[in-house]
Amino acid sequence: MTPYFAWQSTHRRHHIYANNLAKDHNYVPPQAEQYASVLGITTEQLETLDEMTEDAPIAAFGRIVMQQVLGWPMYLLNNITASAGSLYGKQSDKILGNSHLNPWSTLFRPEEAHLMIASDIGLALTASGLYMAAQKFGFASVALLYGQPYLWTNHWIVAITYLHHTHPKLPKYQPEAWTFIKGALATVDRNLGFAGQHMLHNIADYHVIHHLFSYVSPVI
């Protein structure tokens, strides 16, 4: 249940603009002033709040649950963690206006709409198949055999990409200081041990190379 061509489009632009604070699509941290404005507090109050909650187990647990359960669906629905400059149009305040599910959202060029429609058709067919399976075998069986693995896969997508793109020593660049090489090198490989090698096929081990040598078409 992932819109194939929609994610292909935005992931491609993430590779082009990795770690560019103005144009990247993934894990772009909000500036302190922007974050404080969303919360309706001052930057000084934000610093105090961070100090009070950064080591609180319940706060850390809440962030983990929200990120690992809702992070991927919210990215697909609302393009969270992306910069406003990553959009082709002005950020929309409409429902699904910045969504991977909307063929005419601000994420895509008009000439890409037919590909996004194909993605949505694929999602609709999959959802229909799941509905028919639930009618025949029961909702609980489908939830166990499809829903639970889907959540588990989503967990790993978010966890691994988060670890690849966040580290205290990894820089994020303003546009005037950014280059493609700087952005590609500002990612990190992660060794997940036995599970990473034998169960996840080394997906976490070679992310820097993935950014340096993956094919992307010219910047547009």
Image: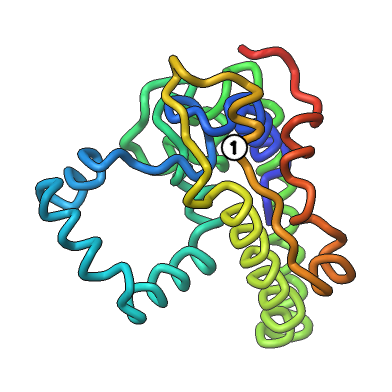
Q: Is residue 116 visible?
A: no
Q: Quadrant of residue 31?
A: top left
**Residue nearest the viewer, comparing 1 with 152:** 152
Q: Is residue 80 above or below residue 202?
A: above
Please state the horizontal and vertical placement of residue 180, each as a whole percent of the image: 63, 21
Location of the N terminus by quadrant is bottom right
Look at 66% across and 40% down and name the residue there: 7
Who's the residue at 70% across and 36% down the image? 8
Compared to residue 28, the image places residue 57 above or below, namely below
**How many numbered circles does the render carry?**
1
Give the image location of residue 117, x and y in percent: 66, 35
Left or right position of 7 against 19 = right
**Residue in the picture at 86% in, 66% down:** 197
Residue 176, relative to residue 206: is it above or below? above
Q: Position of residue 100 (x, y in %)?
A: 56, 40
Rendered image coloring scheme:
rainbow
Give the residue number, with chain letter if any, for mark 1.
Answer: 186
Q: Position of residue 57 (x, y in %)?
A: 36, 80
Residue that extends furthest to the front in the rendered view of this protein: 169
Regarding residue 115, the answer to whether it shows in the image is yes
Q: Amino acid at mark 1?
A: Ala
Above-or-below relation of 119 to 64? above
Disc 1 crowd, CA 10 A, few/some/many (<14, 14-19, 20+):
many
Where is the C terminus found, in terms of image quarters?
top right
